[in-house]
Amino acid sequence: MITQKIKNMMREVDTHISKKERIKAMSKIEDIVEEFNKVKQEQMTKAKQEKKI
């Protein structure tokens, strides 16, 4: 369920943390949360269409 885009964003967060760029890291984390929710919603919609829920 974790897409390549989310993995790349998480890698960027690690970079920001290592450089002690807390604001940039927090901003990127917020972006990850939004992207994860979007992916989750897409998966739920797909499951409903396939009548698995």
Image: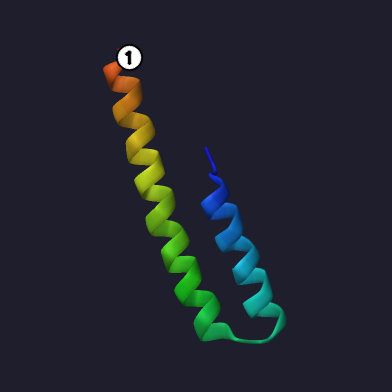
Q: Name the residue under label 1.
A: 50
Q: Is residue 34 above or below residue 39?
A: below
Q: Quadrant of residue 30?
A: bottom left
Query: Looking at the image, how many numbered discs can be counted on the residues?
Result: 1
Q: List x then y, in percent, for residue 1.
A: 52, 37
Q: Is residue 20 above or below residue 27?
A: below
Tell me which residue sits at (67%, 70%) in the image. 14
Tell me which residue sits at (49%, 67%) in the image. 29
Residue extending farthest to the right is 18
Q: Quadrant of residue 13?
A: bottom right
44 vs 31, left or right, is left
Tell me which residue sits at (65%, 64%) in the image. 11
Specify how the rendered protein is coloured. Answer: rainbow
Q: What residue type is labelled 1?
A: Glu
Query: Mark 1: which secondary structure?
Result: loop
Q: List x then y, in percent, for residue 16.
A: 63, 79
Tell me which residue sits at (60%, 86%) in the image. 21
What is the quadrant of the C terminus in the image?
top left
Q: How crowded is mark 1: few (under 14 residues within 10 Å), some or many (20 or more)?
A: few
Q: List x then y, in percent, for residue 28.
A: 49, 70
49 vs 32, left or right, is left
Q: List x then y, in percent, for residue 39.
A: 40, 43
20 vs 45, left or right, is right
Q: Is residue 43 above or below residue 28?
A: above
**Front in this rendered view, residue 29 or 11:** 11
